[in-house]
Amino acid sequence: MLYNKILESIYYLAGKTTKYDAWIKYQALMKNQWLPREELKKLQWQKLKAILTYSYENIPFYKNKFDSASLIPYDINNPKDLLHIPITTKEELLKETHPLNPKLSANNLEWVKTSGTTGTPLNWPFNIASYNTKYALLLRDYSFTDWKLGNKTASLWWPGHSSYNGESFTEIKKLVYFFAHRRKLFSPITKDSTGINEPLTNTIYNNLKCSPPSVFETSPENLLFLCYFMEDNALQPLKIKTVVVSGIITENMRNKFQKWFQGEIFNTYGPHEMEGIANDCSHHQGLHLSSDSYYLECLNENEPCLPNETGKFILTDLDNYTQPFIRYEIGDCGSYSEKQCPCGRGLPLINYIEGRSKDFIINQNSQKISPRTIIKFFGNYPEIKFFQLIQKDLLKFQLFLIKKNEVYLNIEMIKTDLKNILGNSADIETLFTQAIPAEPSGKFRWVKNNVGAIHESPLQNRTAI
Ligand SMILES: [Zn+2]
């Protein structure tokens, strides 16, 4: 308790007297979250106009986008006007020289790397001001749990995660993680497939058992590895107060994690180029969008989606002036909700993420099926530990399965049920395996679509979830 207070005072003093002002930014964010929704919208729009103007005036890449649409920032007065600014893709950014702003020197910047789950990783620069904003957002995310500065944390990611290759790890970050987060960074359980490293898993289990952190941050796949490890070896469940999960989790998974970790499970969403986009509070009604730091558009064929209708996420980062992201297609799909969360926060809700747009399956009726739908489907079969569904062409699918030892699996029944989603003509080849290969980044994908062209088709049969 005293340690928490001392750290808060140090953070406060640093914020007032040095360029490390994350705590001051954090305090502002803490106030923002309770603002009435209309006030937050006003603040968001002001910030949006400011970054559009800055980008138009300082960054040729974005000025060209405005010019190609014969627009100037002054023309953007409502969300519909925004639709005229061409979307920015990761592929476009990969072709550019960074930093995009020619007045900035690359030597004075830090670099953060995206995970590159479905493509080439992107190195993105940030300066100390934008880093402090991101860190302040992270602290607000933590505040949704009851974590305080100085409480122990632990993280377990996949091999390609930026924490392991250190490119954006400055000395100050090391100090912060050591003293303020008291973070234990575990080595990845997996190397290149779901075949797990048993001795390492055992070490992680023992560590979490003997010295449980207040917050354990990881991916759903890592949590499943640990759950199965405990189950297979008849071990005692762990006791961890808060587990923060980055990735798609279903209700079945949440229940399983609660059983084996005996704490509260929080879901969070924030790919590396845009940390702290959204996370859920203790009411678990969806994810609170950090609308004071991001402008989210949810689009189907460049048309705004209705509430609860799945679309592509297009994000504008309202705080990153080092290298702005304007109408950036982040590659994920989801939907927004108009529900008010009982917690009373003014930050709007989005529903839990549906998955990467490139991973959507398209069935014979031209419906796009989200990875979340497929993951939920397999949640009904507790005999299956891991699966990977790959679409080879419109009607051809490969299904890899890792099942629990010595259990009977009625595979014909599963295929019949799966055809209710994929279509009756779906040709599903089933393969039992011991390990499923991971992506080059070390991340695992439950659903893969190897038929590239279909991603360009609109999200048909627009259904509310
Ligand atoms: Zn809430």
Image (cartoon, grey):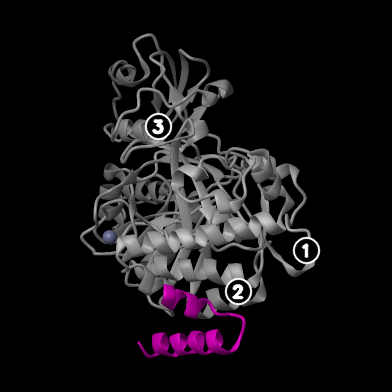
Q: Quadrant of ligand 1?
A: bottom left
Residue appearing at x 44%, y 50% in the figure = 222
For marks 3 and 1, give the CA distance.
Answer: 42 Å
Residue 174: give its label.
Answer: 2
- Report which residue position mark 3 lands on: 370
Range of the magenta residues?
1-28
Per the image, label 2 sits on a secondary structure element best described as: helix
User: As shown in the figure, which amino acid type bears the numbered disc 3?
Assistant: Ser
Q: Residues within 10 Å of mark 1 (few under 14, many from 20)?
A: few
Q: Is residue 27 magenta?
A: yes
Placement of 419 over or under 211, stated as above or below: above
The residue carrying mark 3 has its beta carbon less than 8 Å from ligand 1: no
Mark 3 or 1: the one toward you:
1
State which tag comes first along the sequence, 1 or 2: 1
User: Within 8 Å of ligand 1, the CB of disc 1?
Assistant: no
C-beta proximity under 8 Å, tags 1 and 2: no
Circle number at residue 89: none
In the picture of the structure, the residue carrying the numbered disc 1 is 103
Q: Earlier in the sequence, mark 2 or mark 3?
A: 2
Q: Amino acid at mark 2?
A: Lys
Q: Residue at x 61, y 72 (%)?
A: 129
Query: Which residue: 31% across, 30% down?
Result: 377
Find numbered disc 3 in the image and state the secondary structure of the residue it sits on.
loop
Rate crowding at label 3 as few (under 14), some (14 to 19) or many (20 or more) other CA atoms within 10 Å: many
Q: Nearer the viewer, residue 161 or 461?
A: 461
Residue at 51 percent of width and 54 percent of height: 157
Residue 361: x and y in percent read 45, 25
Decide: is 56 above or below 183: above
**Alpha-carbon span between mark 2 and mark 3:** 38 Å
